[in-house]
């Protein structure tokens, strides 16, 4: 946590005896300081108008049945119960949970293990590796989707490798197959995030005091014990950052799904955000779409809140 | 001995990870460099490298218009959002504002909230204002989400500047804006640079808002939206041309990345989560 105590007039300098003066000064300052909000106002106004208010409106819209054109009918929580009874909520959120594994847990685990392997050595050319490993983070998700569509294509590199290995029997259009589409899209997310996680953890591991490793070794800890006793606890902050960033990305995840499978085949890769887009702009069930958007927002807040609480910093900085 | 082995294994792992990170992009680059219309498969390197796919994609995909749109939208969003964030971050981090914590909390919420939950009302609002298919339709919401990140970021930075430096100007009787301009901003320049880089990246790559708000007007589409339409239209394009289009769209960001790597990496590593 960064310091939330803003400097108060005279607090640092005032000796204890001069209580009345700073108190007076503070009161005067306090009244005047509402003017400081003039600096905040432009940012706050745009933010409220085009980010906060729309969320509220979405929540309101979710209580209506609406095709986006004609008059809306009030249905209360009808959209929510309908979505639950038809299984749409469960299935889209279920896909999100699968993506949570592939987009957040898997890259975090991979990054952690690789960083753990490297705590004992000095890495040469770290800057270069870092630049390369960050490339998936900077590419547009549409570019990523186009690239992976080719990798997974019937005549693409993945199937060519499988053929060369004599596994011609398993080749397929990976993104078009009901059995493999979800996992295939998931692995794209793993690819996008693993470099970031690795680099976060490598940078963090360099800050763990050497003595901790030495004393662990004196206690007779092997590499694996050392990993769990020293490395993982030492990376608490980085773990939280990595998990929060990847989780938000995993749950929002519209671009990659839309540009690889568009939610298909069938609805086998339809995540909430895809349902929101389809409902709001293609099938014209705006109320349903809004309801899913609300559920998605709450879901993200809950999951991110849980991660933050679980990996809270022990000592306030 | 084992130290040596550890070092070799670790570096081998890093090389492998780097190859994995590079491969998908390299594969479409290879694909794109083939002669147009050539039947392609698997791994084959281009025999007669040609830029035919690139010229085809450029002409058929309307990417010159898209590039202009992306530049205008991204430029406006970054400049305005950085300006507003610096002002708000300064006030919330340095001036002793009542309820500052609450306001920061409200901005923090914007780092977590999904765009997906805002597009429906924004679409209808822009439609009502007659702005669908125009730049402001995308610019306004993009600024809104950018100032959330920016304000939190700049507040964190300004708050970490030693109080003595912050107060030096106040004692001289300089106005608040002057303190910001002449004392704090020069110190904060690197942090502002990282923020601008990060916002450039997010705005340039943003897809959903562009898809929803600009689809109606092919001239106003941003590069990711143009690429999405181009790649989705299979009659217009074969794998080679689509790959070339993707490479073209990636190029500006890759060039910016090579030019300002450290700022990108710093921004991404620091993450949006600085609270």
Image (cartoon, rainbow, N blue to C red):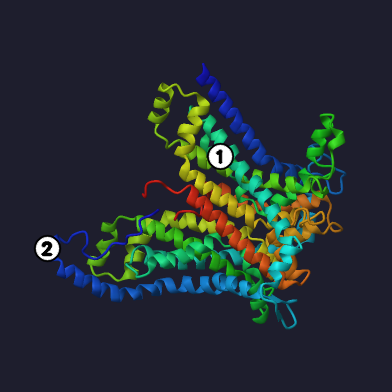
Q: Name the subunit of mark 2.
A: A
Q: Say if residue A277 shows up in the picture.
A: yes
Identify the residue at the far bottom of this view: A71
The image position of residue A250, as x and y in percent, is 63, 52
Q: Residues within 10 Å of mark 2 (few under 14, many from 20)?
A: few
For the C terminus of chain B, the image quarter is bottom left
Q: Which residue is mark 1?
A: A198
Q: Say if residue B140 shows up in the picture.
A: no
The image position of residue B72, as x and y in percent, is 60, 67
Q: Is residue B139 left or right of residue B61?
A: left
Q: Which residue is mark 2?
A: A17
* Residue A93 in which image quadrant: bottom right
The image position of residue A253, as x and y in percent, is 66, 55
User: At 82% from the left edge and 59% from the top edge, which residue is drawn?
Assistant: B233
Residue B274 vertical position relative to residue B97 in the rendered view, above or below: above
Q: Is residue B185 left or right of residue A98?
A: left
* Residue B38 in which image quadrant: top right
- Depth check: give the residue in front, B40 or A308: A308
- Depth check: give the residue in front, A179 or B100: A179
User: At 55% from the left edge and 67% from the top edge, which residue is drawn?
Assistant: B143
Pointer 2 and pointer 1 on the same chain: yes
Of the residues tagged 2 and 1, which is closer to the observer?
2
Q: Residues within 10 Å of mark 1 (few under 14, many from 20)?
A: many
Could you say whether the residue bearing mark 2 is in a helix, strand or loop? Answer: helix
Residue B228 vertical position relative to residue A124 in the rendered view, above or below: below
Q: CA distance from mark 2 to mark 1?
A: 54 Å
Of mark 2 and mark 1, the one earlier in the sequence is 2
Q: Which mark is residue B140?
A: none
């Amino acid at each position: 946590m960064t310091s939330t105590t803003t400097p108060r007039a005279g607090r640092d300098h005032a000796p204890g005896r001069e209580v009345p003066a700073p108190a007076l000064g503070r009161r005067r300052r306090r009244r005047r300081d509402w003017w400081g909000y003039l600096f905040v106002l432009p940012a706050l106004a745009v933010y409220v108008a085009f980010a906060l208010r729309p969320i509220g409106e979405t929540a309101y819209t979710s209580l209506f049945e609406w095709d986006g054109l004609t008059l809306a009918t009030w249905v209360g929580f009808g959209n929510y119960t309908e979505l639950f009874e038809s299984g749409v909520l469960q299935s889209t959120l279920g896909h999100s949970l699968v993506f949570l594994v592939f987009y957040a847990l898997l890259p975090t685990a991979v990054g952690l293990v690789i960083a753990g392997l490297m705590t004992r050595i000095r890495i040469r050319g770290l800057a270069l590796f870092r630049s390369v490993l960050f490339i998936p983070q900077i590419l547009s998700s549409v570019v990523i989707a186009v690239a992976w569509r080719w990798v997974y294509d019937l005549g693409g590199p993945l199937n060519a490798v499988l053929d060369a290995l004599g596994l011609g029997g398993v080749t397929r259009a990976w993104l078009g197959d009901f059995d493999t589409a979800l996992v295939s899209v998931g692995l794209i997310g793993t690819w996008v995030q693993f470099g970031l996680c690795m680099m976060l953890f490598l940078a963090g591991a360099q800050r763990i005091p050497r003595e901790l490793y030495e004393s662990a070794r004196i206690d007779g800890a092997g590499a694996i014990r050392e990993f769990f006793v020293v490395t993982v606890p030492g990376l608490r902050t980085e773990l939280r950052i990595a998990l929060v960033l990847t989780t938000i990305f995993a749950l929002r995840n519209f671009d990659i799904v839309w540009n690889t499978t568009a939610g298909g085949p069938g609805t086998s890769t339809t995540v909430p955000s895809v349902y929101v887009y389809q409902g709001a702009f293609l099938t014209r069930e705006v109320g349903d779409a809004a309801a899913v958007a609300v559920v998605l927002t709450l879901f993200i807040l809950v999951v991110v809140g849980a991660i933050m609480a679980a990996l809270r910093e022990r000592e306030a900085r | 001995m084992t130290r040596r082995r550890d070092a070799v294994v670790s570096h081998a792992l890093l090389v492998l990870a780097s190859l994995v990170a590079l491969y998908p992009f390299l594969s479409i680059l290879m694909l794109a460099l083939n002669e147009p219309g050539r039947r392609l498969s698997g791994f084959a390197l281009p025999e007669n490298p040609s830029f035919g796919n690139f010229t085809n994609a450029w002409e058929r995909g309307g990417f010159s218009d898209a590039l202009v749109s992306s530049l205008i939208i991204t430029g406006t969003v970054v400049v305005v959002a950085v300006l507003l964030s610096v002002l708000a971050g300064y006030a919330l981090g340095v001036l002793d504002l009542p309820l500052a914590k609450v306001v920061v909390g409200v901005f923090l919420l914007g780092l977590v909230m999904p765009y997906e939950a805002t597009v429906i009302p924004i679409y209808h609002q822009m439609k009502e204002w007659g702005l669908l298919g125009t730049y402001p339709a995308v610019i306004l919401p993009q600024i809104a989400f950018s100032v959330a990140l920016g304000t939190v970021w700049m507040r964190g930075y300004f708050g970490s500047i030693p109080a003595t430096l912050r107060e030096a100007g106040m004692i001289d009787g300089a106005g608040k804006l002057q303190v910001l301009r002449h004392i704090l901003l020069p110190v904060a320049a690197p942090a502002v640079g990282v923020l601008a880089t990060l916002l450039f990246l997010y705005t340039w790559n943003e897809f959903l808002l562009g898809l929803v708000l600009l689809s109606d007007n092919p001239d106003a589409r941003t590069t990711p939206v143009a690429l999405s339409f181009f790649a989705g239209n299979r009659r217009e394009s074969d794998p080679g041309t689509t790959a070339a289009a993707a490479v073209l769209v990636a190029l500006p960001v890759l060039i910016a990345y090579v030019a300002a790597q450290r700022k990108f990496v710093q921004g991404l590593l620091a993450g949006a989560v600085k609270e």
